[in-house]
Image (spheres, helix red, strand yellow):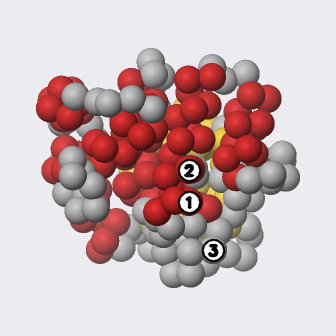
Amino acid sequence: MTYVDLIRKTAREQDMEASVIDVFANLMTYIEEKRWQGACHACSSALYVALCERGLDPRLCIGECRYGADGIPFDHSWIELDGKPFDVACAMRLDTGAPICAPVIGGVDVETGEPTEMRYGIEFLGLGQDAMTVYLTPFADFMDGYPYERDGLWTIVGRCLGETVDVDELRRRYTHTARDCVRRGE
């Protein structure tokens, strides 16, 4: 099964609505098509808007993470719904394009069906310069600044939703969005 298939399966097992499942699957499809490496900040931003547009109340998170007990800490962005992590960007990391781990849906590793070994929001050194820049950049500016789509990351929101979006309206509604810097320890 592909990651898209596994995302759909895992989300269905969590009784998610079809339109929400499509958001995750459509984003994973985009990541794979574009070989979108190391795009966690961009993915989580587009995913945040798309999930809000589907009537959910996601939390846009940034912080340090570690895969497994002995993994190397790294800066990362993800979404939380009801306190559970949702992370598809972990499937294509910056340095090699290989997965850090399989996508995470509701805290579940889609490959194993078990709780993920990814630890979100660990306390280590604090955000590095690149992540701190993302954290401090106004949300609409960050969304507008993505150079590979005509309308920035707003275009990817439309891909996630599977529909054409009114970029000006989205920009207006989400201009004051802020990321939550998560540090909860291990």
Check disc 1 and report its element: helix, strand or loop: helix
Q: Is residue 59 visible?
A: no
Nearer-N-terminus badge (1/3):
1
Q: As drawn, is 121 to the left or to the right of 70?
A: left
Q: Which residue ends up furthest to the bottom in the rendered image?
A: 95
> Mark 1 and mark 2 in contact (Cβ < 8 Å)?
yes
- Where does label 1 land, which residue? 32
Q: Residue at x 67, y 47 (%)?
A: 4
Which picture quadrant has residue 117? bottom right
Residue neighbourhood size for the residue with mark 2, other residues' Cα within 10 Å, grouped as few (<14), some (14–19), many (≥20): some
Q: As drawn, is 160 to the left or to the right of 122?
A: left
Residue 123 against residue 85 in the figure, above or below: below
Q: Residue at x 81, y 52 (%)?
A: 1
Q: Position of residue 6 (x, y in %)?
A: 75, 45
**Quadrant of the snapshot with the C terminus:** bottom right
Label 2 and label 3: CA atoms lie apart by 16 Å
| Tag 3: amino acid | Ala
Residue 146 against residue 95 in the figure, above or below: above
Residue 119 against residue 166 in the figure, above or below: below
- Where does label 2 land, which residue? 29
Check disc 3 and report its element: helix, strand or loop: loop
| Tag 2: amino acid | Thr
Residue 102 against residue 154 in the figure, above or below: below
- Where does label 3 land, which residue? 98
Which picture quadrant has residue 51? top left
